[in-house]
Amino acid sequence: MRKSVLNSWGRILTGRNPILSIEITRECPLACPGCYAYAPRHLGDDVTLRDVSELRGPALVQRVFQLVRLHRPLHVAFVGGEPLVRRRELSEILPHLSAQGIDTQVVTSAVGPVPPEWAEVKRLRVSVSVDGLQPEHDERRKPATYDRILKHIEGHRVTIHCTVTGQQAGRPGYLEEFVRFWSAVPETKHIWISLYTPQLGETSKERLSVEQRRQVVADLRQLRGRFPKLAAHPAVLESHLNPPGSPARCKFAQVSTCLSADLETPVTPCQIGGSPDCTECGCYAAAGFEAIGRHRLPIGIRAGALFDWSLRVGAVVRRLREAAHPDGRDDSLEPRPDPALQPAPADSGRSQRLTLSRDP
Ligand code: SF4
Ligand code: SF4
């Protein structure tokens, strides 16, 4: 943990974001209520993920490698849409990034089998989205039902990620039942809990009331000692009650570069897109960064103050670099691209789309 914070700090000082998040496809066979990606303003006025173009096959693989050379991230997250739709491309991309010491994460509904070869990829986290207990989840996320998830993650060690919505938060004991179930699944390595983040002005059943947020955090505090797989650090839980409040104050947003499926259009202000209500942010990652920022260092200052100073230094370094290298190349400051990150030779060119059957 300490090493990755230090690495990230070093990257920020060079004016680069340590996190790159890529919507690897615009396709998804699910239609989850409350989905951020297909919300009407995900990419600005009336533009959703479905409206952008997308790449496939060798062109997609090459473009991802280009982006990694350009941004030099420490962590790359592949989100969607459903990333398993591009599993052949990812099976090529993930081992290369791993060989470069880059951490990767694939956020999936596990609507299809997680490729067996991914179990051998070091530094890869497969994060499976599960929306509550079976009856609610199966209703919200069919065809990625509990039965299919359990079958599709066999042989892997995955992170189960639940985004708690208003519907789940109202039921006493619900979270405990959820954490107990997934703790007993051998394939579960960690359990992460986020809270639903609404858009500004949103009125929906997913949105939690202030009282519900407090209750969820109280439940998690009570569960964390009893279920070792549950990641619920007290400082992170505290951040859920006191979110950043605006994108300008969100450290996670400030260190992330998020791109949509055309691998050009930025997703702002963070990977949620649209106009999220940061005063009710429930993102697990944002809460983690917030918790680190509020931590007081032995030298007496908050880590967040040091972080803000580093961002300002990094912005100056970036401006200097961009002035010196307007084409985006930066051979003087960066190590030369590793051959392993060069694109693989084009294959037969066949369509690499995975057909995700609704009834496997
Ligand atoms: S699986 Fe993800 S991208 Fe697909 S509809 Fe559900 S929330 Fe949206
Ligand atoms: S991660 Fe949360 S606080 Fe940060 S910009 Fe997104 S919604 Fe706002």
Image: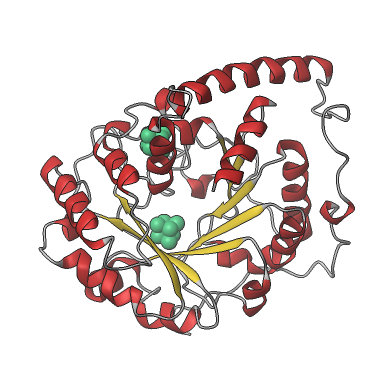
Q: Residue at x 35, y 30 (%)?
A: 244
Q: Residue at x 67, y 14 (%)?
A: 316
Q: Position of residue 195 (x, y in %)?
A: 29, 49
Which of 352 and 99 lies nearest the eye of the viewer?
99
Q: Position of residue 212 (x, y in %)?
A: 14, 48
- Residue 45 in view: no
Which of 125 and 278 lies nearest the eye of the viewer?
125
Vertical side of 248 occupied by 95: above or below: below
Vertical side of 121 occupied by 23: above or below: above
Vertical side of 325 occupied by 108: above or below: below
Quarter of image, res 135: bottom left
Q: Residue at x 58, y 55 (%)?
A: 25
Q: Is residue 266 left or right of residue 70?
A: left
- Residue 107 in view: yes
Q: Count all numbered tags in the image, as a single digit.
A: 0
Q: Is residue 195 left or right of residue 354?
A: left
Quarter of image, res 256: top right
Find the residue positioned furthest to the front.
298
Coloring applied to the structure: secondary structure
Q: Is residue 108 left or right of residue 98?
A: left
Question: Which quadrant of the render holds ligand 2?
Answer: top left
Quarter of image, res 26: bottom right
Q: Is residue 344 left or right of residue 293?
A: right
Q: Position of residue 21 (x, y in %)?
A: 57, 45
Q: Position of residue 89 (x, y in %)?
A: 70, 63
Which of 278 and 233 lies nearest the eye of the viewer?
233
